[in-house]
């Protein structure tokens, strides 16, 4: 693909890079546009032939046929050229969107943490549309306009050099003032787009937590904030309109002033006999003829400024760090033994300016069986899982799976080893089957039924009206917390992981659900390495090994009985039956 995202490259180069793949079509459309225009010029001549034929009493058939052919073919060619241009513009937008979408989903978690999803989204949906005008009529009209402008100026020079000098002087003054206006248009555009991004960010945030917004009575505040961003976009849009109006009228004035100057200077030259009246008239006609190409060039320059603003914002996404690319092929289901995990002297912070979240963490998980991670809220338990999945990379020490540093694994292979059940395991929109097959699209119905049995969900399946084809909704509202967690486990298991990472839900489960969950996990731990962030005493009592974390450090490792004996924090936690988050 093009290199539209190289750091330090001027924005106009990036903009051209978006259009470059379509240059042949753009040139073709431009040439066709010119041909269509020329057909328009031929029309009067053809009309003259018709009239002449009338005068000579000849048959009208041939000149009329010629006139019709010219009109029809001119119109067809012009329409085709316009279509080609619009189509190209759409293709430029499509390519830009696909690139951005591809990048967004591969962004590193650290970059996403610092960005606003709604703003990122607006760059794909809104900013890309600004490329349309530039890539379509903008560039061709601009080039055609410039061509006609230069050609007319040459012809005017042939007619009278002195008048041309007077004309050019006026045009240059105006041109310089336009150069001053153009960057202001670009800036207004960029600010308007930034405000639209902000609006998207606020909306995304409040729609994502709409229940809380409503329950907190925060609708007015949230809409004020989003509305404020919309207002900001309006302000800068109006500002742009003002500069555009100024540039438009400046271009128009340029021609008018040049006309007056030429009339004065030319009149004097005609009076002194240095020039013929007919030359002066021709010159003035050319001058008027310039109005159209000049306004075309100005409009193209304005569109170009919008394009530049869009490209700058899109490039911010292109420069965000992404994970290494995979070829998109599903990685073969890893088979084999339970994986081993080791953390050796791991240090980690989420960002340079944040404190250390993990300090010198070391522990080993040799193979199959259940390892429980316990500790107060914020101790760093979920962070350990994130490092295993390599959502983030540690700043010191080594995180290894099967004895191999996670940084040395090809990312898709590493993640195929693991099944990850998040604390608030999301249910994706779609049917139960879609949800279960999310991490293993090739899984058969037999395999699905098998994992449903393992996760004690067979009963649920019987109660659902359409079985596996039941829609379980955007956020799985039809499933209870315990069922949701077990659906997430079933989803992870269908991947046939050698390591299951389970961030236990903190919500209280009823006794039946809790038992079902515990049985399922113990069953899985017989053949698979299971690491569970435990929030319930009942989960840890059967664990082979418990790692107690506190404020980013490993306090103690042992069995339930050993730790009750040896570790004070663990004793305290156990006394409250856990249920810390
Ligand atoms: P636990 O799962 O043990 O409750 P976490 O691993 O989620 O704890 O978090 C450990 C610490 O890291 C907390 O202080 C938390 O505020 C911080 N933290 C967690 N996620 C992020 C993040 N994405 N960016 C910055 N800080 C984070
Ligand atoms: Mg957590």
Image: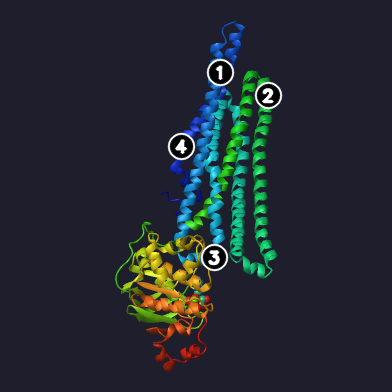
Q: Which type of secondary structure does the marked residue at label 4 adopt?
A: helix
Q: Does the beta carbon at disc 1 come under 8 Å from ligand 1?
A: no
Mark closer to the observer (4, 3): 3
Q: Does the beta carbon at disc 2 come under 8 Å from ligand 1?
A: no
Can I make out residue 319 in this image?
no
Q: Which of the two labelled residues, at mark 1 and mark 2, occupies the earlier sequence position? A: 1
498 on left or right of 171: left
Mark closer to the observer (1, 3): 3
Q: Which type of secondary structure does the marked residue at label 1 adopt?
A: helix
- For label 1, the residue is 67
* Separation of residues labelled 4 and 1 (CA atoms): 29 Å
Q: Which of the two labelled residues, at mark 4 and mark 2, occupies the earlier sequence position? A: 4
Q: Which type of secondary structure does the marked residue at label 2 adopt?
A: helix
Q: Are marks 1 and 2 in contact (CB under 8 Å)?
A: no
Q: Are marks 4 and 2 in contact (CB under 8 Å)?
A: no
The tag on residue 25 is: 4
* Separation of residues labelled 1 and 3 (CA atoms): 66 Å
Q: For this rendering, which residue is in front, 380 or 232?
A: 380
234 on left or right of 477: right
- From what the image shows, is residue 576 above or below residue 40? below
- For label 3, the residue is 475
- For label 2, the residue is 268
Please provide percent x and percent y for residue 205. 59, 64
Please provide percent x and percent y for residue 486. 46, 72
Image point 53% across, 20% down: which residue? 69
- Tell me the colour scheme of the image: rainbow
Q: Does the beta carbon at disc 3 come under 8 Å from ligand 2?
A: no
User: In the image as oriented, which residue stretches furthest toward the top?
Assistant: 57
Crowd rating for badge 3 (residues with CA inside 10 Å; few <14, some 14–19, many 20+): some
């Amino acid at each position: 693909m093009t290199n539209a995202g190289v750091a330090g490259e001027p924005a106009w180069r990036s903009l051209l890079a978006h259009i470059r793949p379509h240059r042949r079509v753009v040139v073709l459309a431009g040439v066709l546009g010119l041909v269509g225009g020329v057909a328009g010029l031929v029309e009067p001549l053809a009309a003259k032939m018709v009239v002449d034929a009338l005068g000579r009493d000849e048959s009208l058939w041939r000149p009329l046929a010629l006139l019709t052919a010219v009109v029809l073919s001119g119109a067809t060619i012009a329409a085709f050229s316009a279509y080609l241009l619009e189509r190209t513009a759409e293709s430029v937008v499509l390519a830009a969107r696909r690139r951005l979408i591809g990048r967004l989903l591969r962004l590193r978690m650290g970059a996403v943490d610092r960005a606003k999803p709604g703003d990122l989204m607006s760059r794909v949906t809104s900013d890309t549309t600004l490329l349309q005008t530039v890539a379509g009529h903008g560039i061709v009209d601009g080039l055609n306009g410039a061509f006609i402008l230069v050609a007319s100026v040459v012809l005017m020079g042939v007619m009278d050099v002195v008048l041309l000098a007077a004309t050019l002087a006026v045009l240059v003054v105006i041109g310089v003032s336009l150069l001053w206006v153009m960057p202001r248009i670009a800036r207004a555009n960029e600010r308007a787009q930034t405000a639209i991004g902000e609006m998207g960010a606020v909306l995304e945030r409040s729609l994502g937590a709409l229940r809380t917004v409503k329950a907190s009575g925060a609708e007015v505040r949230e809409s004020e904030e989003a509305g404020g961003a919309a207002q900001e976009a309006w302000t800068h849009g109006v500002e742009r309109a003002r500069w555009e109006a100024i540039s438009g009228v400046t271009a128009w004035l340029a021609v008018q002033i040049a006309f007056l100057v030429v009339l004065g200077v030319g009149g004097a030259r005609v009076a002194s006999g240095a020039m013929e009246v007919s030359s002066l008239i021709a010159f003035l006609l050319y001058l008027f003829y310039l109005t159209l190409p000049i306004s075309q060039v100005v409009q193209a320059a304005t569109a170009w400024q919008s394009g530049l603003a869009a490209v700058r914002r899109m490039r911010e996404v292109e420069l965000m760090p992404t994970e290494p690319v995979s070829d998109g092929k599903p990685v073969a289901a890893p088979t084999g033994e339970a994986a081993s995990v080791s953390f050796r002297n791991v240090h980690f912070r989420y960002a340079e300016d944040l404190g250390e979240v993990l300090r010198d963490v070391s522990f080993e998980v040799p193979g199959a069986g259940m390892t429980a991670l316990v500790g107060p809220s914020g101790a760093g338990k979920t962070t350990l899982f994130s490092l295993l999945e390599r959502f983030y990379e540690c700043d010191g020490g080594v995180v290894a799976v099967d004895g191999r540093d996670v940084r040395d694994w090809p990312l898709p292979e590493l993640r195929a080893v693991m099944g990850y059940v998040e604390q608030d395991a999301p249910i994706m929109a779609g049917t139960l089957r879609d949800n279960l097959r999310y991490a293993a699209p090739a899984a058969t119905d037999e395999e699905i039924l098998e994992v449903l049995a393992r996760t004690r969900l067979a009963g649920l399946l019987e109660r659902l009206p359409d079985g596996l084809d039941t829609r379980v909704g955007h956020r799985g509202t039809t499933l209870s917390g315990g069922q949701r967690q077990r659906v997430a486990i079933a989803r992870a298991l269908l991947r046939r992981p050698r390591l299951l990472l389970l961030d236990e839900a903190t919500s209280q489960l009823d006794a039946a659900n809790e038992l079902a969950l515990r049985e399922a996990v113990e069953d899985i731990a017989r053949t698979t390495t299971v690491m569970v962030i435990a929030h319930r005493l009942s989960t840890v009592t059967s664990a082979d090994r418990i790692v107690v974390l506190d404020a980013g450090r490993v306090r103690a490792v042992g069995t339930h009985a050993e730790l009750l004996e040896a570790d004070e924090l663990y004793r305290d936690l156990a006394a409250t039956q856990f249920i810390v988050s």
